C-alpha cells in the first residue's frame, strides 16, 4: 500500500522500527547475560554487531524510501519541489547528457528548465541506496537527498564508520575482531539513538512540508 498521508508514513516507520528494536533488545539481553562461557560470549558479541548493523542499514533505507514514496504521492510540479528533490528528479536527464557529452542532449535539459517546470514531477522510486555499507559519508548523501540535517550525526561519524561499519565488515569477511560486552552495549545505545533521530527527522520533514520549495 502506497504512503499518502503523514499518518501512514509515521505508522510505517513505527511498525518497522518496533520489530527491529525488539530483536535488538533480545540480542542485548543475551550479551548482557553473565552465565555464559567466554567463548559463547565472544560469539554473541560478534553476532550482535552484525545484527546491529543490519538494522541500522535496513531502517535507514526503508525510512528514506518511504519518505520519498510519500513525496511522490503529493503529485507536485517540478517548480513546487524543494531543490534537493528537484536535483533528484533531474539526475537522469543530466546523467545521460554528461555521459555521452553530446551537445544535442543538453538541449532537452535546457528546454526543460525554460518551459516544463510547471509539469507534474516524476521522481524515481526506491532510488535511495546504502550500497550495503552505510558509512557516515553515505548517510550524509542520503540526508542531502531527503533535505534533512546531517550535522546531528557529524560528531558520531567515528562511531558509525569505525565501531559499527568497520567492525561489521571485519566480522563479515571472517576476520578476528575484538569487541567486548561493554563496547557492544555502548554501540547499541548510540545506534538506537540515531535510529530514533532519523525517524523523527523524516516525520518532522513531512509535517513541515520540507519537500516543498515554499516550506517555512
Image (tube, rainbow, N blue to C red):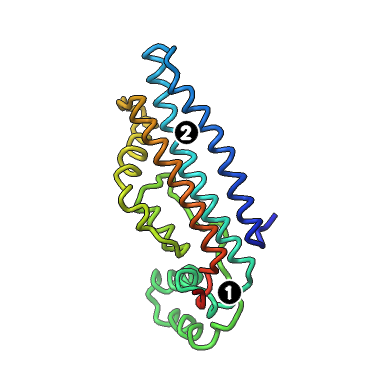
Residue at image mark 2:
51
Q: Nearer the viewer, mark 2 or mark 1?
A: 2
Residue shown at the point (54%, 82%) measured from the top left: 117
Q: CA distance from mark 2 to mark 1?
A: 38 Å
In the picture, measured across the screen, residue 59 lies left or right of residue 188, that is right
- Tell me the quadrant of the picture where the N terminus can be found: bottom right
Q: Is residue 215 above or below residue 116?
A: above
Out of 119 and 214, give the one closest to the viewer.
214
* Spot occupied by residue 206 in the image (x, y as percentages of width and height): 56, 63
Residue shown at the point (33%, 42%) measured from the top left: 159
Helix, strand or loop for disc 2 = helix
Q: Is residue 109 above or below residue 89?
A: below
Residue at image mark 1:
121
Helix, strand or loop for disc 1 = loop
In the picture, measured across the screen, residue 149 lies left or right of residue 117, that is left
Q: Furthest-bottom residue in view?
A: 114
Q: Is residue 31 above or below residue 215?
A: above
**Which of the 4 image quadrants contains residue 6?**
bottom right
Residue shown at the point (58%, 40%) measured from the top left: 18
Reading the chain from its start, which is encountered first: label 2 or label 1? 2
Out of 172 and 63, give the one closest to the viewer.
63
Q: Is residue 94 above or below residue 33?
A: below
Amino acid at each position: 500500500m502506497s504512503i499518502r498521508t503523514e499518518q501512514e508514513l509515521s505508522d510505517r516507520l513505527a511498525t518497522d522500527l518496533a520489530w527491529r528494536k525488539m530483536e535488538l533488545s533480545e540480542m542485548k539481553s543475551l550479551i548482557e547475560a553473565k552465565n555464559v562461557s567466554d567463548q559463547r560470549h565472544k560469539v554473541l558479541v560478534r553476532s550482535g554487531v552484525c545484527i546491529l548493523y543490519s538494522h541500522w542499514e535496513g531502517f535507514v533505507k526503508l525510512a528514506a524510501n518511504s519518505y520519498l514514496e510519500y513525496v511522490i504521492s503529493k503529485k507536485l510540479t517540478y517548480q513546487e519541489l524543494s531543490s534537493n528533490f528537484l536535483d533528484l528528479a533531474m539526475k537522469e536527464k543530466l546523467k545521460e547528457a554528461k555521459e555521452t557529452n553530446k551537445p544535442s542532449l543538453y538541449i532537452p535539459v535546457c528546454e526543460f528548465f525554460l518551459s516544463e517546470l510547471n509539469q507534474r514531477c516524476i521522481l524515481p522510486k526506491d532510488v535511495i541506496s546504502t550500497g550495503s555499507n552505510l558509512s557516515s559519508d553515505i548517510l550524509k548523501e542520503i540526508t542531502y537527498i531527503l533535505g534533512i540535517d546531517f550535522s546531528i550525526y557529524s560528531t558520531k561519524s567515528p562511531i558509525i564508520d569505525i565501531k559499527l561499519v568497520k567492525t561489521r565488515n571485519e566480522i563479515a569477511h571472517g576476520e578476528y575482531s575484538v569487541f567486548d560486552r561493554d563496547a557492544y552495549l555502548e554501540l547499541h545505545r548510540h545506534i538506537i539513538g540515531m535510529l530514533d533521530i532519523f525517524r523523527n527527522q523524516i516525520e518532522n520533514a513531512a509535517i513541515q512540508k520540507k519537500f516543498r520549495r515554499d516550506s517555512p
